[in-house]
Amino acid sequence: MTITTLLVANRGEIACRIFRTCRDLGIATVAVYSDADADALHVREADLAVRLPGAAPADTYLRGDLVVAAARAAGADAVHPGYGFLSENAAFAAAVGDAGLVWVGPPVKAIELMASKTRAKELMAGAGVPLLAPVDPATAGEDDLPLLLKAAAGGGGRGMRIVRELDALPGELLAAAAEAASAFGDGEVFAEPYVERGRHVEVQVMADAHDTVWALGTRDCSLQRRHQKVIEEAPAPGLDGSLRTRLHEAAVAAARAVGYRGAGTVEFLVSAEGRPYFLEMNTRLQVEHPVTEAVFGLDLVALQLRVAEGGPLPSPEPPQPSGHAVEARLYAEDPARDWQPQTGALLTLEVPEGPGLRLDTGYTGGDTIGVHYDPMIAKVIAHAPTRTEAVRLLARALERARIHGPVTNRDLLVRSLRHADFAAARPDTGFYDRNLAELTAPGAGRDPATAALAATLAEAVRGPGAVRGTETVRGTGAVRGTEAVRPTRPAAPVPARFGAWRNVPSQPQRKRYRSEPDGTEHEVAYRTPRTGIPEPHETPGTRVLTATPDHVTLEVNGVTRHFAITTHGDRVHVDATDASYTFTTLPRFTDPATHTAPGSLLAPMPGTVVRLADGLTAGATVEAGQPLIWLEAMKMEHRILAPASGTLTALHAAPGHQVEVGALLAVVQEDPAATAPVPVPVPEETA
């Protein structure tokens, strides 16, 4: 059967990526969207779009019946699930087939066999695939530690716990089972040895219905936070030829054992000694598939469509790989604050273009990052002849990117790529556990004081009272229907007006900024002499070469430096050639602030209250560090802890409540005779 119209049962970046291949192949596209995604990029790019009423995933993208109905209503003849959501749901795959639609994915039976990690491991043992020996939690002893608890039906780190003390095992089992049941509707949890400093290595497979199975090299996905991948590369570095061959053979054996067709990934844990162990098989396209595409010169989505139509793979053997590729996931999150997800308007997203660079994204400037979905903004991929060149190219592209809006992990990505441990080509899953403090510390080579000076000079040229706005520009991007936000320029500097009070322009003026997200304050002094060109005051070694509302060039200790300036409200974004800075303009005179009552628990992010501690009511006695409120935001669950031992004097949260960042959830009145308070009452992530 020839596919003419394809519905993508997904959103964001992966939907846009699949649509790109469909356009190349002449296939019409259909998007589905929730109310929260009504103006999302994937909706703007599709030929047709069907609304799924509601905002939460459970009401929209996880409703297989609504997705199938949407496909039929739009006249689609095939469905591609992307990744996440329903992509590995056997019942949904069966429903697509029952509706007379082509399923662009593996056979239903293969999905069922690999859906449970415990059943998959039993099947792989029979196929001769190397495995970690399971551990029965009921009989586990000290010699079995550390243990890794995992959800049998899960993924993405949900329901996963590391147990290093035997006394903690019962409680962690209950917590893991509860989280697994909440996330996947299945509370089954199993235990296996936890491999210290292991590597996450996977093999991309592609199979057709004509008995051809390709093993498309290896990928290393060891750099992870919360058991979720951050940086991936192909091929996996530092593996000898015999180990690569063993991984390829095991992956092909796994695919053949379940009669696989289409794109899939077989994941392994490789110990420090070089021993591989099967983890699971993802019966879908992976987020990190672009690095394999770059190295092998393939379009995996095009191959998926070809196989779904019944066609064979182009040849019995895969093409030869070439070069090295690295991918970084750009997230709206703050790594320095326990990876807290961030929301809000993405004002600017510009990543350099050039040979070897690729950007996969579901956003453009002007879009909003909401609370309902994963906080990934984009994937940036670099391909070059060698690993060193690819890593260097990717780090520099990220460094030069202009990203204005919520806090992102961009600086962390750049520092990770340039870290000595990563450069040594033997990454492991403990990388961020060891290095996070170093990677999120105030960075060497950054100069926020000079960036703040550039922001001040741009504002001085702009003129007092000149407010920079934004305008929406449609259809100006490289992708059809994109929308961008660009700053508007005042026609001319607004002249100063003088009343009963006046500033003498020749005298030093001062501006105050708060650096985001670390909160450091900067004060900048400048003068505007009769020439009208502002100049730094009390900044020896710095000379102004040019200053406009959008661009400032300074000579700092003999070195010329360029700064692009963009203002959105009270936020000023300064993009230098080697770093980017965000400042909040502070009032010249500090107004008295309204202080929050001691013991107040504030929402650290917008989200939904999912549950309260048992019996929690106003008047209850609480202990320092006790989890009181569980808040879910952007697919992650966070615990709000009691800041001190005392009495809960107010409770404003209830299950199901939607709260904004900074909302007052509860108040704890400290008991002076009780134990010392928790130093910083921050949420603790549980997923």
Image: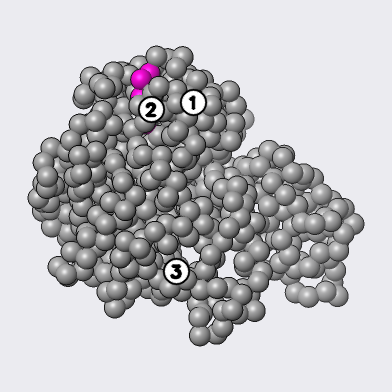
Q: Residue at 58% of width from left, 45% of height from top?
A: 633
Looking at the image, is 20 positioned above or below residue 460?
A: above
Q: Position of residue 401 (x, y in %)?
A: 30, 43
- Disc on the earlier residue, 2 or 1: 1
Given this view, does label 3 or label 1 mark the residue nearer the observer?
1
Image marks 3 and 1: residues in contact by CB distance under 8 Å: no
Residue 185 appears in the picture as rendered: yes
Q: Position of residue 448 (x, y in %)?
A: 40, 54
Is 215 left, or right, of 73 in this rendering?
left
| Residue 123: quadrant of the picture | bottom left
Residue 597 appears in the picture as rendered: no
Residue behind mark 1: 67
Looking at the image, is 129 positioned above or below residue 112?
A: below
Residue behind mark 2: 79
What segment carries the magenta color?
A: 76-80
Q: Amino acid at mark 3?
A: Asp
**Of 597 and 529, which appears nearest the observer?**
597
- For label 2, the SS is strand
Q: Amino acid at mark 2?
A: Val
Looking at the image, is 628 positioned above or below residue 42?
A: below
- Disc on the earlier residue, 3 or 2: 2
Which label sits on residue 636? Answer: none
Q: Amino acid at mark 1?
A: Val
Image marks 3 and 2: residues in contact by CB distance under 8 Å: no
Residue behind mark 3: 433
Quarter of the C terminus within the rendering: bottom right
Q: Residue at 14% of width from left, 68% of height from top?
A: 241
Q: Residues within 10 Å of mark 2 (few under 14, many from 20)?
A: many
